Image (spheres, rainbow, N blue to C red):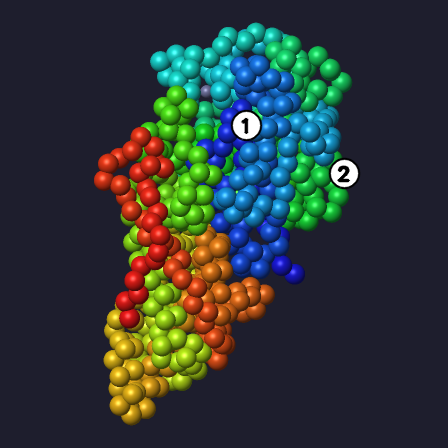
Amino acid sequence: MPTPYFITTAIPYVNGRPHLGHALEFVQTDAFARWRRQMVDDVRFLTGTDENSLKNVQAAEREGIPVRDLVDRNAAEYYALRGPLNLSFDDFIRTSVEARHIDGVRKLWEACDQRGDIYRRAYRGLYCVGCEQFYAEDELVGGVCPEHQARPEVVEEENYFFRLSRYAEPLHALIESDRLRIAPPARKNEVLSFIRRGLADFSVSRSKARARGWGIPVPGDPDQVMYVWFDALGNYITALNYADENGLYQRYWAHNPNRVHVIGKGIIRFHAVYWPAMLLSAGVPLPTTIFVHGYVTVEGSKISKSLGNVVDPVELAERYGTDALRYYLLRAIRSTDDGDFAVERFARAYTADLADQLGNLLNRVVSMVGRYFGGVVPAPGEPYAADRRLIEAASGLRDRAGRAMDRFAPHDALAAIWDVIGAANKYVDDAAPWALARQRKAGDSAAGAQLAAALYNLVETLRLVACYCTPFIPATAEAISRQIGCPLDIEADWARWGGYPAGAAVQPGGGLFPKLEVAEERGSTLAKALEPSQGSKSIDI
Ligand SMILES: [Zn+2]
């Protein structure tokens, strides 16, 4: 039986269009999901949109359109990232329209209420609409929200509260012991010290008037709607039909050892403290792992509408290729840290790693099989000493890349794969197949056997590289598999050396990555600064 693996992104507010920061989280989560599928786990990958927030109401008011129209339009844009980013999510939940969600969060509320953890009280606090959260005076920086640099509003009303204070000890114990694993370790320590400072009960509703009537009504009190976090966090189980606890819920939540949330560092408190406390209260199993990624900046500045650097991920993917963008987000940005999207770095990674190393290796190998063996990949024969080094490097990928992915570190997994690509390029130079071909022509049969072994080893290395690249740059992996004439069958024992069927024919298919030229003059937009040119690199054989 394959192991179940449930993985989620956070669900973004739909008050604006998706930007590069969203693309980073979606592509990372997609790579984790695809990696697990590659390891033949039973994966379910969930994403969606958080539609009941006050931010959405205010954005609609600014545009002068009904909230429903704004939410529907923008939710469609998030869903539509699936194509240009090549996302493989299995489910997409919308919190304002789906009965499974509305019924599910009402059930969650009632479960917490029955436990005695929800009570009503008058409250006065400082509220940042951008964050949809209350701030204590000492959490503000110079009187403004640290995330939005905006002065919070004073809000005074009677709300329902969740008795978070009751859960400090059990939460601390669960996180410290890694029964609820928070990765990377620095984030775990951040959460533990937050809990040790003491947990205050938090507001889980607001007046219907302040919410402009938008949101899910509190069970038994139609004058209040659920606070956006109580509602939004619930999506992780409501999408699995927590409302009736049916098969999906049993398979991917109740009886699953891998319940994984991928989130940005700005919402760690909600996911690592509020959400598990709500679940403890409701008697529902907790997530097993929360992975926290950093933020992406653009040319060194935080992504912000006012700065005008909201890079459109769809535009980038359409211009330079989905896989070029995915590769950059996964390799050039360390998943656990903040990273930057910069034109020069993007162009460098594209040219050096994708075009020169991977694209060129494929071109060289496929061309040589064509030239020296009429396009049919020869049987390997006995490996030579240099071959064994390449074989060991390629065979070791499962451990190296696997360990990196266990740490949610796709940048390290890709570094390991590119080490093998580098070793294969060096192997071509060292083995010098063109010299062996000349010796073979002169009647040297040992040179002929060595030539056959060299090309088999290179094609087999490309097969393994394509398999390991599938979670990160899936279309490129498929293109490699087509050109080397070998489908990537993950049901088979694909990771073992020697899986390429000798006697199959290569299918030359042109360059994987067209040459990119960086304009001398930096344009006002990224799109102007990079111009892809036609044609592919010349082949060096
Ligand atoms: Zn804020």
Placement of the C terminus among the 4 image quadrants: bottom left
Quarter-of-image position of residue 240 = top right
Q: Report the residue that reaches farthest toward the front.
A: 534
Of residue 498 and residue 277, the one placed in the foreground of this image is 498
Residue 277 in the image: x percent, y percent?
59, 31
Task: Give the residue type at disc 2.
Answer: Asp
Q: Is residue 306 above or below residue 42?
A: above
Residue 13 badge: 1
Secondary structure state at the residue bearing disc 2: loop
Q: Report the residue that reaches farthest toward the left.
A: 520
Of residue 274 and residue 357, the one placed in the foreground of this image is 357
Residue 138 in the image: x percent, y percent?
41, 15
Residue 244 badge: 2
Residue 259 in the image: x percent, y percent?
58, 45
Q: Is residue 538 above or below residue 392?
A: above
Task: Identify the residue at image location x=66%, y=38%.
Answer: 239
